[in-house]
Image (cartoon, rainbow, N blue to C red):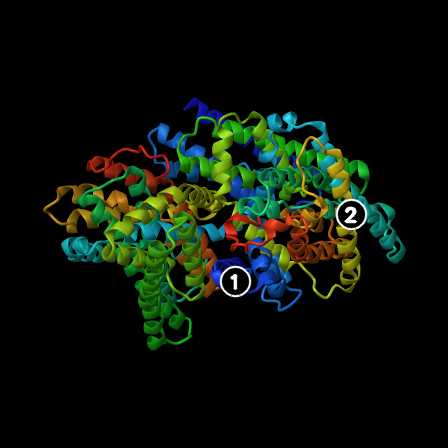
């Protein structure tokens, strides 16, 4: 029943989200933004989940865990596939410095004060608090480039600037994933040494599956077989990770990266095949993430303003640093930090993964803060992005945002 | 071929390694997704191997499930296989939808009455013979032995209605795989579909009679209401589904395979909750579309062939993994007797009552009627739920029969289609 409910809810929301009225930013700018980014699914998930109306109970969510794991694995594989070694090698060092600076500053701006606050207000052991605060920082460090992409596509921003912002936001994923690994090492096992072992297991599993998928898809020409092999491979890596209680997301990234490295010509086909499922998977994931939100989590509401404000500040300062580092290499817009306020789906993946692998009160608070923060940041991002645009380009009204272009970014 | 075997071998080694690591790891999660991924990949490559050695792909799917599943190598945990129930409904709906698109009014006019007569004869004779056999086995069947004669007669009738059932899923999947076309194939498909309707009605009546024999009283009105709802309600919901599909294809027309999978999933799950037959719902939807808009029905056919491979490979591999091999040990002899009796009854009924104008029907039709799968599983589970005292034991007996039929049925069906010369090869790898 729960699977049917989720399916029907997502289908109904998809129909709603394709409404031109809702997507018209002239009528309901906030709603249009949330619908286009897919975060409306998250809000409905939160409403239907056990934290609010309770149409889906905690037991239902337990039954839907495989769907969540599949979505995490798929997200990981897609991320890994985008790590093209040749492209990464061709980027100058200044670009990495710029990406690291905007992500790193936001990370420290959020993680350090949050760690102090959590240490003072909870009686949890230091490694758990450090791991949790690091995850808040990791989520804060992540940005989505969808505003920049839409900005240059609609002619409101120069193409080179839009692409430069998008590139920086793609590279910050590395910081987020690295910190997730650290948080899991500290929190998901009895000791850090065991945590390192589990992390290695996840990465090894991902690499083995990636190499195997590359071999399985080699020589497959039929599109149906390719889709089947890809779906099976993603399910296998996500499922094996979930079965062994290691991170499906990290295993997926390792799988995708290995596939990109050794997959040869099949990679493009595999990525295309997987791309068809990206948007539906993202929407289901966002909906399920919403279901896990505890809207009555008072501690999370207390931490939320601080988290959003510190992240904003971190992005503004980090953006200035990044502009300085990348001067002469990338053509970045002035006030870069304002273009980095929106958060992508990866931030949600990180905290969902943490909640599953390190269950407890602290991880629930962290999860709630990041998820609620993602919605607020999406709403803030629209206004902040206007500060980035040149005055003469702000004038034309923004066209409605087609849902297929946004969100999964 | 050797490359495919190597791929299958590597997958097996990986699964063995995961199973080994799981033993060391105290804290393990749910295995459902692992089972889905492993069975899909292994099923796909086992299907290729089966095709390479001249067997139906479907047999490859089932066999790999049996070998890797919880009753043989145990690389795929039982909980994982159990969690794949959702896929079953989806696959049955997709297969029935394709079958429905073949049901043109012209075909029904041409062979409808002949099929109905033969179906009645085959079902009637098989029911009678199996009924006698089950009742004769009363002293050796532990659940039947302590019952009174009227009770034993009623339960024998109930078991026999389930034993009679065919497998439209397997038949249609094999027809899809071999791309068989011709009068024999049409006759066979129509017969298994109509046979299923006969069985649904007979099962409802037998359930009512069995309940009455155990003192619950015979509710004739309730019986008519339930059967009517299941038959006509399914057709009605199927018609609504057909309208939804036509509207989508004419107005939206994007990602049709994904849309059909979603819709069939909703129909299967929703239909089960509403006590409808998911098979009949999808069949009615397909038939209505085929007779309203031939072009759209062709598009559905094509779209399901694209989306079908993962669903079918997973469905049949999961069915194989779910086969309780240990039941063969406990009720094996009785089940084997029933398998033989059923096969002989079907063979003789076809020999005597099949239309004379096509001698192929008399010689080979019985081979296409041996398979049993989803419908039979469903009825057996229903018996177990409705009669908790003896139902689970009946289920074990029937599952043991299905195990045998699932392994030999697809091979026989394919053989019959090859013998009558209506197969067109297996060029498209994305068929079931």
Image quarter (top left, top right, bottom left or bottom right) of the C terminus of chain A: top right
Q: Position of residue A344 (x, y in %)?
A: 64, 48
The answer to whether marks 1 and 2 sit on the same chain is yes
Helix, strand, or loop for circle 2?
A: helix
Give the left or right position of residue A215, taking residue B201 as reference.
right
- Residue with the most extreme left position: B357
Residue at (49%, 62%) from the top-left corner? A16
Helix, strand, or loop for circle 1?
A: helix
Q: Is residue A21 above or below residue B412?
A: below
Q: Position of residue B290 (x, y in %)?
A: 25, 54
Query: Which chain is home to disc 2?
Result: A
Give the left or right position of residue A299, taking residue A41 as reference.
right
**Would you say residue B26 is visible in this rendering?**
yes
Residue at (60%, 37%) from the top-left corner? A160
Q: Is residue A393 above or below residue A24?
A: above
| Mark 1 / mark 2, whichever is N-terminal | 1
Q: Nearer the viewer, residue B118 or B318?
A: B318
Q: Dot 2 corresponds to which residue?
A: A314
Query: Which chain is home to disc 1?
Result: A
Q: Dot 1 corresponds to which residue?
A: A22
Q: Nearer the viewer, residue B424 or A368?
A: A368
Asked if the residue at tag 2 contacts the one at tag 1, i.e. Cβ–Cβ closer than 8 Å, the answer is no
């Amino acid at each position: 029943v729960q699977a049917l409910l989720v399916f029907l809810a997502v289908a109904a929301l998809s129909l709603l989200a394709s409404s031109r009225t809702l997507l018209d930013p002239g009528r309901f700018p906030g709603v249009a933004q949330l619908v286009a980014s897919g975060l409306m699914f998250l809000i409905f998930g939160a409403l239907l989940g056990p934290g609010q109306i309770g149409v889906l109970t905690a037991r239902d969510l337990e039954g839907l865990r495989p769907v969540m794991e599949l979505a995490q694995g798929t997200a990981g594989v897609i991320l890994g596939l985008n790590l093209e070694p040749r492209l990464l090698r061709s980027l100058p060092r200044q670009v990495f410095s710029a990406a690291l600076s905007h992500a790193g500053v936001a990370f420290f701006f959020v993680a350090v004060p949050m760690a102090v606050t959590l240490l003072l207000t909870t009686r949890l052991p230091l490694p758990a608090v450090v791991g949790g605060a690091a995850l808040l920082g990791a989520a804060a460090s992540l940005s989505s480039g969808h505003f920049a992409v839409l900005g240059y596509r609609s002619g409101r921003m120069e193409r080179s600037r839009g692409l430069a912002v998008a590139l920086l936001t793609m590279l910050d994923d590395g910081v987020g994933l690295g910190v997730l690994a650290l948080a899991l090492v500290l929190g998901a096992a009895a000791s850090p040494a065991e945590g390192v072992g589990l992390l290695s297991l996840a990465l090894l599993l991902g690499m083995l599956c990636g190499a195997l998928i590359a071999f399985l898809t080699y020589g497959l020409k039929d599109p149906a077989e390719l889709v089947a092999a890809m779906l099976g491979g993603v399910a296998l890596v996500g499922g094996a990770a979930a079965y062994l209680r290691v991170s499906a997301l990290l295993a997926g990234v390792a799988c995708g990266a290995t596939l990109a490295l050794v997959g040869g010509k099949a990679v493009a086909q595999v990525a295309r095949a997987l791309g068809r499922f990206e948007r539906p998977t993202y929407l289901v994931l966002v909906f399920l993430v919403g279901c896990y939100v505890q809207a009555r989590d008072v501690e999370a509401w207390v931490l939320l303003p601080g988290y959003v404000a510190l992240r904003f500040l971190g992005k503004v300062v980090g953006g200035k640093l990044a502009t300085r580092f990348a001067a002469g290499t990338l053509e970045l817009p002035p006030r870069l930090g304002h273009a980095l306020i929106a958060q992508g789906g990866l931030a949600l993946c990180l905290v969902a993964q943490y909640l599953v692998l390190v269950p407890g009160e602290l991880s629930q608070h962290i999860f709630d803060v990041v998820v609620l923060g993602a919605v607020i940041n999406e709403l803030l991002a629209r206004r902040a992005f206007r500060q980035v645009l040149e005055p003469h380009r702000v004038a034309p009204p923004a066209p409605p945002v087609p849902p297929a272009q946004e969100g999964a970014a | 071929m050797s490359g495919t075997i190597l791929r299958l071998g590597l997958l097996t080694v990986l699964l063995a390694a995961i199973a080994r690591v799981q033993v060391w790891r105290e804290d393990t999660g749910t295995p459902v997704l692992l089972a889905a991924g492993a069975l899909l990949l292994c099923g796909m490559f086992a299907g290729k191997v089966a095709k390479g050695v001249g067997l139906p792909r479907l047999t490859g799917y089932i066999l790999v499930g049996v070998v890797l599943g919880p009753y043989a190598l145990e690389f795929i945990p039982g909980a994982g296989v159990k969690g794949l129930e959702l896929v079953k409904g989806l696959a049955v709906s997709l297969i029935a939808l394709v079958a429905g698109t073949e049901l043109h009014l012209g075909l029904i006019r041409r062979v409808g009455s002949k099929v109905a007569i033969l179906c009645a004869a085959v079902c009637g004779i098989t029911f009678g013979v199996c009924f006698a056999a089950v009742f004769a086995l009363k002293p050796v069947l532990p659940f039947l032995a302590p019952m009174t004669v009227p009770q034993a007669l009623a339960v024998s009738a109930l078991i026999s209605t389930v034993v009679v059932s065919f497998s439209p899923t397997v038949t249609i999947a094999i027809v899809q795989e071999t791309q068989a076309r011709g009068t024999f194939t049409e006759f066979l498909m129509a017969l298994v579909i109509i046979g299923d309707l006969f069985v649904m009605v007979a099962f409802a009546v037998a359930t009512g009679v069995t309940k009455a024999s155990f003192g619950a009283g015979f509710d004739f009105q309730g019986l008519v209401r339930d059967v009517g709802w299941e038959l006509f309600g399914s057709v009605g919901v199927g018609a609504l589904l057909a309208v939804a599909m036509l509207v989508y294809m004419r107005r939206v027309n994007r990602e049709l395979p994904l849309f059909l999978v979603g819709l069939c999933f909703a129909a299967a799950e929703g239909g089960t909750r509403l006590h409808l037959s998911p098979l009949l719902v999808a069949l009615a939807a397909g038939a209505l579309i085929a007779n309203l808009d031939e072009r759209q029905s062709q598009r559905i056919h094509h779209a399901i062939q694209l989306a079908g491979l993962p669903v079918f490979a997973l469905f049949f591999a999961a069915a194989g993994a779910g086969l309780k091999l240990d039941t063969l040990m406990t009720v094996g002899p009785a089940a084997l007797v029933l398998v033989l009796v059923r096969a002989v009854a079907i063979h003789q009924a076809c020999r005597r009552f099949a239309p004379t104008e096509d001698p192929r029907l008399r010689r080979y039709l019985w081979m296409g009627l041996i398979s049993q799968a989803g419908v039979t599983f469903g009825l057996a589970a229903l018996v177990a739920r409705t009669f908790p005292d003896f139902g689970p034991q009946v289920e074990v007996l029937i599952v043991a029969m299905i195990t045998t039929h699932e392994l030999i049925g697809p091979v026989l069906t394919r053989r019959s289609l090859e013998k009558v010369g209506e197969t067109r090869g297996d060029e498209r790898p994305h068929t079931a």
